């Protein structure tokens, strides 16, 4: 398996999936979680494009939910982290931790 590095937004999306952690995780709650935790405005469209790309890379799997109960309710594409996605997150974290080792504490935000 080749290690493909994750971009920052891909990491945020995967981490939001992990944090939301149930079977019905889809784009809008993922965007909301990223906004809530980072303070960044996130377009649901950007999340959906990223979810599709992460699924193509094998880091997520998806299923269609039952339609929502309201009249004309639509099914949602729900995602779940795969083992490959979890491993990519672990590797990304390890790489960043190694890069931060030995960096001046002022840059790290510590006094």
Image: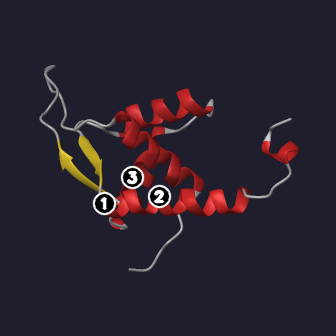
Q: Quadrant of residue 40?
A: top right
Residue 3 % position (x, y): 47, 75
**Residue farthest along the top direction in this orientation:** 70
**Left or right: 83 as drawn, with respect to 92:** left
- Give the labeled residue for mark 3: 51
Q: Position of residue 54 (x, y in %)?
A: 39, 59
Query: For the residue labelled by badge 3, is the local secondary structure a helix, a strand or a loop?
Result: helix
What residue would you read off at disc 1?
A: 83
Mark identifier at residue 90: 2
Determine whether 8 is above or below 33 in the image.
Answer: below
C-alpha distance separating marks 3 and 1: 16 Å
Crowding at label 2, few (<14), some or many (≥20) Cα neighbours within 10 Å? few
Provide residue 101's location: percent of width, then percent of height.
73, 58
Along the line of sight, which residue is nearer the eye, 109 or 67? 109
Who is closer to the viewer here, 86 or 103? 103
The mark lying in front, picked from 3 and 1, is 1
Q: CA distance from mark 1 to mark 2?
A: 10 Å
Residue 83 in percent (x, y) is at 30, 60
The correct choice, above or below, for 98 with respect to 63 in the image is below
Q: Residue at x 56, y 60 (%)?
A: 94
Marks counted in the figure total 3
Mark 1 surroundings within 10 Å by alpha-carbon count, few (fewer than 14), some (14 through 19), many (20 or more)? few
Q: Earlier in the sequence, mark 2 or mark 3?
A: 3
CA–CA distance in space, label 2 to label 3: 18 Å
């Amino acid at each position: 398996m080749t290690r493909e590095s994750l971009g920052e937004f891909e990491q945020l999306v995967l981490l939001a999936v992990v944090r939301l952690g149930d079977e019905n995780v889809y784009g809008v709650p993922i965007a909301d979680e990223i906004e809530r935790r980072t303070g960044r405005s996130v377009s649901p469209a950007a999340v959906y494009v990223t979810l599709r790309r992460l699924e193509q890379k094998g880091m997520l799997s998806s299923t269609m939910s039952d339609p929502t109960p309201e009249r004309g309710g639509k099914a949602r594409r729900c995602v779940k982290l795969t083992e490959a996605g979890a491993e990519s997150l672990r590797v990304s974290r390890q790489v960043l931790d190694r890069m931060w080792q030995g960096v001046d504490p002022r840059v790290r935000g510590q006094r």
